Amino acid sequence: MFSYAPLIATLHKKQINKTQLREAIGASSTTIAKISRDEYVSLKILDDICNYLNVGLEEVIVHVKGEDHQA
């Protein structure tokens, strides 16, 4: 499975909340909710997040080995 824990840490470090992120990248509240639940989002969203925050993908998402796959 994937975890967005690095994103939460990055947002905290940059003092940006999820609402600010959502508005800046033009994402829906549903997409932000999916991130909060460690669910899949499109690569376009991940690209938009990385570009907005000026970070690499490793500061947004991490693969957690051995966890059950969420469908």
Image (cartoon, rainbow, N blue to C red):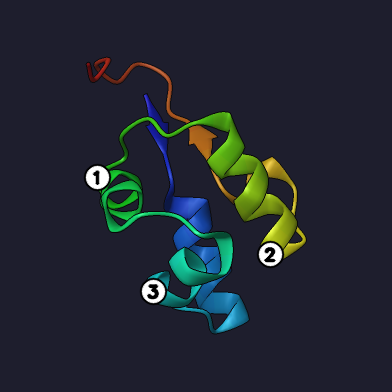
Q: How far is the residue under mark 2 from the one under mark 1?
A: 20 Å
Task: Say what secondary structure mark 1 lies in.
Answer: loop
| The C terminus - image quarter | top left
Q: Position of residue 47 (x, y in %)?
A: 66, 42
Residue that carries the numbered disc 2 in the rendered image: 53
Which residue: 31% across, 40% down?
Answer: 38
- Residue drawn where x is 51% and y is 59% of the image: 26
Instruction: Give the residue type at disc 2.
Output: Leu
Q: Amino acid at mark 3?
A: Thr
Q: Callout 3: few (<14), some (14-19), or many (20+) C-alpha neighbours within 10 Å?
A: few
Left or right: where 58 falls relative to 31: right
Res 62 label? none
Circle 2/circle 3 CB separation < 8 Å: no
Q: According to the image, label 3 marks what residue?
A: 19
Amino acid type of the residue tagged 1 in the rendering: Arg
Q: Could you say where residue 53 lies in the image, as x and y percent from the top left? A: 68, 64
Q: Secondary structure at mark 3?
A: helix
Look at 48% across and 70% down and name the residue there: 23
Query: Residue 60: horizontal and vertical position, in percent?
Result: 57, 49
- For label 1, the residue is 37
